Image: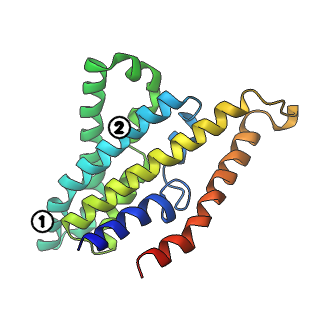
Amino acid sequence: MTKAFLSILITAILTENFLLSKFLGICPFLGVSKKLNTATGMSMAVIFVMLLATAVTYPINTLLENNDMEYLQTIVFILVIAALVQLVEIVLRKYIPALYSSLGIYLPLITTNCAVLGVVILNIDKGYGFAESMVNSLGAGLGFLLAMVMFAGVRERLESCDIPKFMQGLPITLVAASLTSISFLGFTGIVENLFK
């Protein structure tokens, strides 16, 4: 059982990374990754919301399935995620005001962050039980953190580079994002052979 959990965790972090292979959560990836501290803060908030959303939506989904109301999943999940993000926003505003102000508009965007909704729905689509869903959500969150931290490092390094005028701003950011994404392709063979 531990091997299965480890496989789910490593796969979610490296080969099925929500940002770099599924392209879910691109808005905060491009918007908050200019500085390492804001990228880390946003990622920690996303991990928290992913885990809490999974823990809350799993029993709700069971209730919906038992009453033949699966068609309400997306609406109910978005409402649950929105409530959880409001909770995170209140806690950050009260206890970590510096992080709250640095995240700015991007904190409420966790509500519409498709990575959070994606992890909840993909857990159901893959048929994971509660424990597997929690492990997959943790892996997805850690993968989000890894991608954000890596990309923040790349973007901070780009600040000191002499970039041609036509590539400055969004073009160089997208090129850097694509190269960061390609770097994760190398993990595919390693992870596949790790658990055989």
Q: Write the residue at 65% across / 39% down.
A: 154
Residue 147 against residue 11 in the figure, above or below: above
Could you tell whether 161 is left or right of 23 in the image?
right
Q: Write the residue at 17% across / 71% down.
A: 65
Which residue is at the front of the view, 166 or 99?
99
Residue 174 against residue 104 in the figure, above or below: below
Hey, which quadrant is residue 77 in on the image? bottom left
Q: Which mark is residue 44?
A: none
Task: Indicate the position of residue 44 as horizontal and vertical percent values.
Answer: 37, 38
Residue situated furthest bottom in the rendering: 196
Q: Write the residue at 48% across / 29% down.
A: 38
Residue named by callout 1: 63
Identify the coloring: rainbow
Which residue is at the front of the view, 138 or 76?
138
* Quarter of the rendering occupied by the N terminus: bottom left
Mark whose residue sits in front, 1 or 2 = 2
Q: For mark 1, give the secondary structure.
A: helix
Q: Residues within 10 Å of mark 1 (few under 14, many from 20)?
A: few
* Quarter of the rendering occupied by the C terminus: bottom left
The mark that comes first in sequence, 1 or 2, is 2
Task: Indicate the position of residue 36 as horizontal and vertical percent values.
Answer: 53, 31
Hey, which quadrant is residue 107 in on the image? top left
Task: Indicate the position of residue 164 as horizontal and vertical percent values.
Answer: 88, 34
Looking at the rendered structure, the kind of residue marked 1 is Leu
Q: For mark 2, give the secondary structure.
A: helix
Task: Indicate the position of residue 134 as horizontal and vertical percent values.
Answer: 25, 59
Looking at the rendered structure, the kind of residue marked 2 is Ala
Q: Write the residue at 14% across / 61% down.
A: 59
Q: Which mark is residue 45?
A: 2
Could you tell whether 189 is left or right of 106 in the image?
right
Q: Residues within 10 Å of mark 2 (few under 14, many from 20)?
A: some
Could you tell whether 92 is left or right of 37 in the image?
left
